[in-house]
Image (cartoon, rainbow, N blue to C red):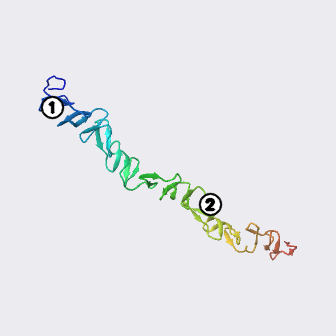
Amino acid sequence: MPANSTCAAVCPSNTLLNPSTLKCDLCINNCASCSNVTSQCTSCNNGTYLYNSTCSTDCPSKYYKSTESLVCVGCVSPCLTCTPASYCLTCATGYNFYNNTCLSVCTDITTIPINGTCTSCSSTCYSCSGTITNCISCRSGFYLFNSTCVSTCPSSTYVDSTFCTNCSAPCVSCLSATACTSCNSSQYLYETSCVSSCPSGTYSTATGLCKNCSTTCLTCNSMATNCTSCPSNLYQVNNTCV
């Protein structure tokens, strides 16, 4: 006999036949339908979700709420929370969250694992290690220098492919491993090399450069026209070749 005191061949969906009283007892605890006992749910009322034959407003960890079926559906391992099953929101211990998936290893080389998340390297780093600012390689337009990415190499280095490489002593600044642009205080820059003394036909400047003597001088000192010797076809007169 149904709960509303009318007789029916089959109990309504939100009730359960009591074989002792032949009454249709109402399902309880937010059950929309039940089986065996009135508290053993087989479906739930709106706003609650079925899990282990009970209906509740929340689903346990590793399950998500299906608003279509009102059932707690299991996440795909190793998702800890998800919506839907394969769209991870958080990951189980030992896995890293990346683009709504859970990875044992961060496969995108532009990321590193930090606190369970594959975290992007800093904006100038292409790849990094340990921290997002400890660069291993750089993005286009930047060069690697002491684990950082810079747009311009420091003066004591030169651009070597995608790296800033230190100039070799006695170069203080350089364009390449063999092309110096300035020298240490005990050397003079001659063309692209550092020399201990300027070669014949040049003179040293206060700025550490070897500059060519005047074309009339064979050798000179302090300035281009201060000749100290002359070509064989000229004669020296008061530091001038005539």
- Residue in the image at 65% along x and 68% along y: 171
Pointer 2: residues within 10 angstroms few (<14), some, or many (20+)? some
The quadrant in which the N terminus is found is top left
Are the residues flagged by discs 2 and 1 in contact, CB closer than 8 Å?
Answer: no
Rendered position, 65 above or below 155: above
* Residue type highlighted by circle 1: Leu
Q: Residue 170: x, y in percent?
A: 65, 71
Of all residues, the one furthest to the front in this rendering is 21
Horizontal arrangement in the rendering, residue 226 relative to residue 76 (left or right): right
Instruction: For marks 2 and 1, give the CA distance.
Output: 86 Å
The quadrant in which the C terminus is found is bottom right
Q: Residue 163: x, y in percent?
A: 55, 61
Badge number at residue 154: 2
Name the element at disc 1: strand
Name the element at disc 2: loop
Q: For mark 1, what is the residue?
A: 17
Pointer 1: residues within 10 angstroms few (<14), some, or many (20+)? many
Residue 15 quadrant: top left
Horizontal arrangement in the rendering, residue 219 relative to residue 130 (left or right): right
Residue 59 quadrant: top left
Of all residues, the one furthest to the right in this rendering is 238
Badge number at residue 131: none
- Residue in the image at 83% along x and 70% along y: 226
| In-front residue for pair 135/142 | 135
Rendered position, 230 above or below 10: below
